Image: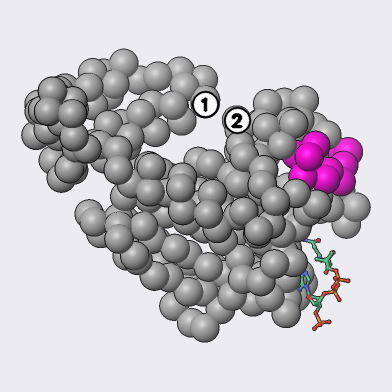
Amino acid sequence: MGQTIQYSVNDSVGVLCINRPEKHNSLGAAELEGVSSALDLIETDPEIRVLVVTGAGDKTFCAGASLDDLNSGVLKPDAFQSVMHRLASLSIPTLARVNGNVFGGGTELALSCDFRIGVKGSRLRVPAAAFGLCYPPAGISLFVEKLGVNVARRMLVASEAMDAGEAHRVGFYDYMVARDELDERVEELTLHIAGLAPLATKAMKELVDQAGRGSIDIARATELARQCEESDDLQEGFAAQREKRMPQFSGS
Ligand SMILES: C/C=C/C(=O)SCCNC(=O)CCNC(=O)[C@H](O)C(C)(C)COP(=O)(O)OP(=O)(O)OC[C@H]1O[C@@H](n2cnc3c(N)ncnc32)[C@H](O)[C@@H]1OP(=O)(O)O
């Protein structure tokens, strides 16, 4: 996975950290390969209930794709996009712990997660138009799908710089906290999600994403609903409610 991408699992919560603070956690070809290797593990590990994506340090979450690697041609925008697409396609819920400023493809990294928690006082900008770069279509679709066309226009066409307060107001951040509250809030959210019934959260993640892209595949929705209805976890959920205790879900 390399030194600049760290992946660990603790109590069914996976943590993927870009550890390249001296380069503002930008993602070069090597880092994207590291993220890809971590995704290989995450996709095949049934124990992981939720993934946290973050950057090292307290200055920058991610400054986007490595300009060095883009300039040298080692990294193509399409390769960046395909890793983001894999992250966005994970079946488990994902949370971006946005530990600081976000630039360019760093915003796409955050948007590829289901939930985003940001820090008061940080800022955000997609500078592609300031370089003369046209953001790739899959990225543009993701901005529109997650934020709506008007906000995507402000961020991409106008390359508007936003402080975290504005980014929270327009829906980029689901939650915004003071820096010293970040870890507590991330832990609270991840433990809460990790305690939910995995089949149901995965099913609803898939269907919410489908709905966000335009429409739900009803046959798939019916199949997912049936899986949940026939699951041991539904019985456990009902039993826990009757017995006034916390459910212990197995994911089956
Ligand atoms: C499909 C996706 C496309 C994309 O994502 S394109 C990339 C979009 N991202 C950006 O345009 C951000 C570029 N970076 C910056 O604007 C600035 O940096 C910051 C605002 C993030 C930080 O500014 P400051 O605090 O003044 O630090 P510093 O001296 O500019 O940077 C320290 C080191 O970090 C490297 N770095 C920062 N961002 C990137 C990057 N995106 N790719 C590669 N390196 C980056 C610099 O070069 C430098 O390195 P050294 O110390 O060796 O001179």
Residue lying furthest bottom in this view?
3
Disc 2/disc 1 C-alpha distance (Å): 6 Å
Residue at x-position 90% and y-position 52%: 130
Mark 2 touches mark 1? (CB < 8 Å): yes
Please state the quadrant of the image where ligand 1 appears.
bottom right
Q: Where is residue 201 in the image (x, y as percent from the top left)?
A: 33, 35
Q: Is residue 110 magenta?
A: no
- Where is mark 1, residue-wise? 213
- SS state under label 2: helix
Residue occupying the point 60% across, 30% down: 145
Kind of residue at badge 1: Arg
Q: Which residue lies furthest to the front in this view?
A: 244
Q: Is residue 123 above or below residue 150?
A: below
Q: Within 10 angstroms of label 2, few (less than 14), some, or many (20 or more) residues?
A: some
Residue under the image location 70 percent in, 67 percent down? 58
Magenta part of the chain? 157-167
In terms of secondary structure, where does tag 1 sit? loop
- Quadrant location of residue 158? top right
Q: Residue 153's spot in the image, x, y percent?
A: 80, 32
Going by the numbered disc 2, the residue's amino acid type is Glu
Read off the residue under disc 2: 145
Please tell me whether residue 51 is drawn above or below residue 62 in the rendered image. Answer: above
Q: Is any atom of residue 17 visible in this view? A: yes
